[in-house]
Amino acid sequence: MSLMALREQLNGLVNSMFLEGLLDDQFEQLQMLQDESSPGFIAELITLFCGDSERILAELTKLLDQAVVDYQKVDAFVHQLKGSSSSVGAQHVKLACVQFRQFCEEHNKEGLKGIYFFRCLRALNVVKHEYYLLRGKFDTMLQLEQRIQAYESKQQI
Amino acid sequence: MSSPRGPKACGGGAADRPIHVLAVDDSSVDRAVIARLLRSSKYRVTTVDSGKKALELLGLQEPNVNMIITDYWMPEMTGYELLKIVKESSELREIPVVIMSSENVPNRINRCLEEGAEDFLLKPVRPSDVARLCNRMR
């Protein structure tokens, strides 16, 4: 595929992510910080975010699997994930975390505790769904970037 | 009085030594973001993941830190606790401290400002926030 076609594909992908709301303005601001002095910034950030998110999702899964759920710990982890998704501009993931936290706060309500637990479990699944959707597109994005950079360094020779 | 330099060239300190910012945050993602934001304004940046490590660095002979920017919510030592320790120390109290938080809690903000914080930034931190800090360096 030609360099121009690769660039078009990458731009198309990123634009669609903005349009669908997977990414927000924060990501756009971060993109502008990538330059000749830090060409790998976005790739590094995405890698950090994904590693961090998957660690947190694994912890949350374990916590909700316990006989007695420690909702304070659950909330602390969701807060962390909300923070990093917000910092990176991962809008849908962030919103899913906000929703999740609301369910965490409600779990103390009188009666029907089982229902609130179920809602938390479902909320976790929504977060996972949004995260893995984003992660798939991030993977494609990084692959395209790598191919483009390989092309560009060949051209400089 | 405003600096004759624009925000882009903010990093030049006395004798053209780049201004050194110590960034404290337990989130690796946020550390990467704040470091990039500061470096693109030509600051020298050191990042640590805890208040304890920040104090270790500040306790060195020549830390040469011109500003501390710290997250509020961190396990073991919060940014507020770090702020208090810095402001109570005769060697460190002149260093401006900026607090970052993802939560907009007026009580929290006031408490930090009363304790001597230079500024309070709401996360996610953006380039315009960093530009604002330019004039507050020591």
Image (tube, rainbow, N blue to C red):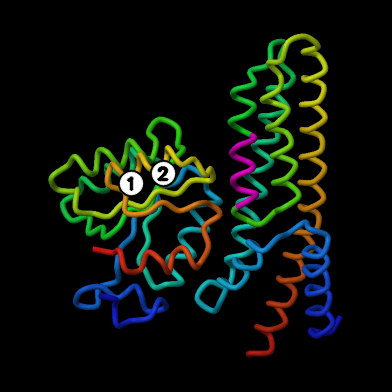
The residue lying at 35 percent from left, 74 percent from top is B10
As helix, strand or loop, the secondary structure at mark 1 comes to helix
Pointer 2 chain: B
Residue A97 x, y percent position in the rendering? 70, 39
On residue B136, the disc is: none
Residue A60 x, y percent position in the rendering? 69, 29
Q: Which residues are magenta?
A: A78-86
Bin the neighbour count of mark 2 within 10 Å (Cα to Cα): few under 14, some 14-19, many 20 and up. many
Residue B6 x, y percent position in the rendering? 38, 81
Of the pair A43 and A112, the residue shown nearer to us: A112
- The residue under label 1 is B113
Task: Tell me the amino acid under the disc marked 1.
Answer: Leu
The residue lying at 77 percent from left, 9 percent from top is A111
Distance from disc 2 to disc 1, alpha carbons, whole Å, reads 6 Å
- The residue under label 2 is B109
Q: Quadrant of the N terminus of chain B?
A: bottom left
Task: Tell me the amino acid under the disc marked 2.
Answer: Ile
Compared across the picture, whether A86 is left or right of B76 comes to right
Residue A59 x, y percent position in the rendering? 66, 29
Residue A22, picture quadrant = bottom right
As helix, strand or loop, the secondary structure at mark 2 comes to helix
